[in-house]
Amino acid sequence: MSGSSPRFRRPASLYPSVADQLPGDPDPGTASDLAHSSASALLDGVFHSEDPEVVQRVLTLAAREGLGDLATLWSRAPATTLPGALWRLYVLHTWVQRAGDDVVLRYRQGSRTVPGLRYLSGLSEPPDVDEVRRTMDDILRGAFTGDLGMALIRAGAVATIVAHGTAHLADSSPEEGLTAQAERLLSTGEELVAAGRHAEAGTLD
């Protein structure tokens, strides 16, 4: 309807304790509270669950529902908050799953520039597409079931390596937009690492 805000679609397949917090159209004044409470509920619910199906639903959440619902919840949250960190992690994970060949090309280029980050990423040298996708699955799973701080730092390492690889390709490719992509990936990598440090310090709220 003209002049009205877009309808917020409740992601019914989310963990129930998260879905219960989404009453409909979120008031802009409570958007930050909703972002934080939903992210905390999702993380806590999965962390304390022994049901493998719950973990799998979270891993495939963006693939099933798309990033739209998550964007509505979390995309405006600062990087060093829990919803902001989870948003960046899901975006990176989704891109890797969808563009594996491209990610591997960029990763291989970037790993020559920042070899010290390779051990943090957990990838072998050189990785193939299946390994990159499995690794991002493991990182996302680890964020919810293991060490959140380390998972975010590992994701940041992947993004930073790929950023350097993208910058190399920008120098030798006529394709437009690669330089901007490299800058965004580098920013994402730095933000994920910063969020990981906050998680390790217990200050990722």
Image (cartoon, rainbow, N blue to C red):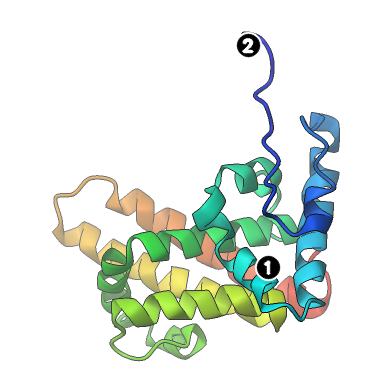
The three-letter amino acid code for the residue at tag 2 is Met
Q: In the rendering, at what x and y percent does residue 113 appear?
A: 32, 79
Residue appearing at x 37%, y 53% in the figure: 181
Residue drawn where x is 70% and y is 80% of the image: 145
Is 127 left, or right, of 1 in this rendering?
left
Looking at the rendered image, the disc whose residue lies closer to the viewer, 1 or 2, is: 2
Badge 1 marks a residue whose secondary structure is helix
Image vertical order of residue 200 relative to residue 1, above or below:
below
Which residue lies under the disc numbered 2? 1
Mark sitting on residue 195: 1
Query: Residue placed farthest to the top in the image?
Result: 2
- Could you tell me which quadrant the C terminus lies in? bottom right
Picture layout, residue 92 above or below residue 110: above
Looking at marks 1 and 2 on the same chain, the residue that comes earlier in the sequence is marked by: 2
Mark 2 nearby-residue class (10 Å; few <14, some 14–19, many ≥20): few
Mark carried by residue 94 = none
Picture quarter with the N terminus: top right
Where residue 148 appears, as percent x and y from the top left, is 70, 77
SS of the residue under disc 2: loop
Q: Quadrant of residue 24?
A: top right
- Residue at 65 percent across and 61 percent down: it is 86
Instruction: Check disc 1: other Cα within 10 Å, few if <14, some if 14-19, many if 20+.
Output: many
**Is 122 in front, or is 156?**
122
- Where is residue 8 shown, x and y percent of the image? 69, 32
Question: Residue 153: percent from the left, percent from the top?
Answer: 59, 77
Kindly tell me whether residue 177 is visible in this rendering: yes
Q: Quadrant of residue 100?
A: bottom left
